[in-house]
Amino acid sequence: MNPIKVAVVGYGGMGGWHTERIAKMDKFTLTGVWDIDPAQLNNARACGIHTYTSYADLLADDSVELVVVATWNDVHKPLCIEAMRAGKNVISEKPVAMNLKELDEMIAVSHETGKLFTVHQNRRWDEDYLTMRAIAEQNLLGKVFRIESRVQGSRGIPGDWRREKGHGGGMVLDWGVHLLDQALTMNDQSPLQSVYAQETHITNDECDDGFYCELQFANGLHYSVEVTTNNFISLPRWYILGENGSTVIEDWDLHGKMTLVHNWDKIDSVPIKAGTGITKTMAPRTDETIHDAPLPQVHGQWTAYYDNIYDAIRNGAPQTVTHRQMRRCLKLIEAVFASAKTNRVVPFDEDA
Ligand code: NAD
């Protein structure tokens, strides 16, 4: 084992998370952290972590091979570019950049310097997401034609830089980037055709405090993503519809079930009373033709993300979160903003 020496820039919530995880992995050693806020540097020192005197001081440390950028979103680009130019490999926190133009500049520097450059899309290893994917990819419901993915909060936008556009605030760039990356990764080989989106501004005029979007993929899948911060009753994290069954995954703790039809053709029923009328169409099925099944068990190993970084740097393995995927996700974010602004369906050009 030849551990990779890592420095973290930005020692807030996520910088702290990275330093804790790095300390637990044999493949990595933390050299220290840098933050523009002296109080954060004091916090780091109180945890026994070495602090650099400036970003230049961090980059001048020849032992550092990998820099993790965990700052506000608006400074990811300059910090990542400076690090690559100083000969360091780079992981940026998500969103990797404020827009596609910035990302293209960052990718160009990665090519020019030959340094690894990727983004921390840790939620590709979330077990709720992997469970949804297993259900769809193993055809447990037959062909899946609709997926609803949502996260719902009730506390507005946290009272920090996330409320300010200039720092890259708003929920599209915060939670949206995770949920959109999940949708695209699952449909890596199926072109995305169109996007329709709406933002909410219930508690914040400057930045979206939530959004809803509909993604239409060429394989027929209709995939919706919703992020809210003003909901006091939450809908399930996942709702999945297939030809032969439906699934609800309630939450990150994987409560939920699949309901499967085992006798599709037995569709006749007596009408039921519904509101002020009657209906046969909406009469629920009985146990004669449907049954419940537990969710499949899927285990996500988040450390797979850092394992891949190690293999990519030490052994030349391809990076899991690729430049193509990073561009596709930022292109989608731009389409979400464009659709929300115009209230129109936006065609998605995979080749742009
Ligand atoms: P935070 O405000 O808690 O921490 C950010 C820190 O960056 C602050 O301490 C700030 O002083 C520092 N900083 C800002 N500009 C700097 C600069 N130029 N140089 C050095 N330090 C600087 O924010 P956070 O919640 O930790 O978010 C940080 C990043 O992590 C954001 O990009 C966010 O989107 C991302 N994030 C990712 C996840 C995830 O699950 N992957 C979760 C939360 C946040």
Image (spheres, rainbow, N blue to C red):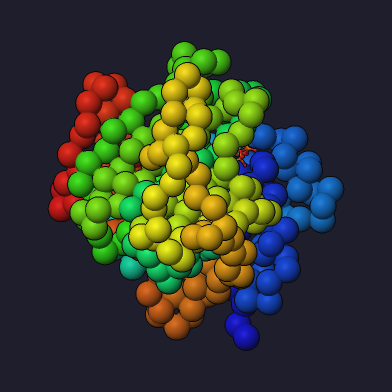
Q: Is residue 85 visible?
A: no
**Left/right of residue 4 with respect to residue 321 in the rendered view:** right
Q: Looking at the rendering, which quadrant does residue 339 occupy?
A: top left
Name the residue: 51% across, 15% down. 202
Image height of 309 relative to 203, above or below: below
51 to 134, vertically: above or below = above
Residue 271, can we see it? yes
Residue 37 place in picture, x, y as percent: 67, 34
Percent of width and height locating residue 95: 45, 44
Which x, y percent locates residue 5?
60, 69
Outermost residue toward the front in this view: 270
Q: Nearer the viewer, residue 281 or 68?
A: 281
Instruction: Find ligand 1 in the image and state its quadrant.
Output: top right
- Which residue is at a point 38% across and 65% down the rendered structure image? 142
> How many tags in the picture?
0
Q: Which of these two is toward me, 328 or 265?
A: 265
**Quadrant (top left, top right, bottom left, bottom right) of the N terminus:** bottom right
The residue drawn where x is 33% and y is 68% is: 114
Give the residue drawn at x 15%, y 53%. 351
Image coordinates for residue 240, horizontal then vertical, percent? 45, 51
Locate residue 32 relative to residue 67 in the image: left or right.
right
Q: Is residue 49 left or right of residue 335?
A: right
Q: Is 58 left or right of 78, judged from the image as shown?
A: right
Q: Which quarter of the figure has residue 197?
A: top left
Pick the residue in front: 200 or 262. 262
- Answer above or below: position of 58 versus 37: below
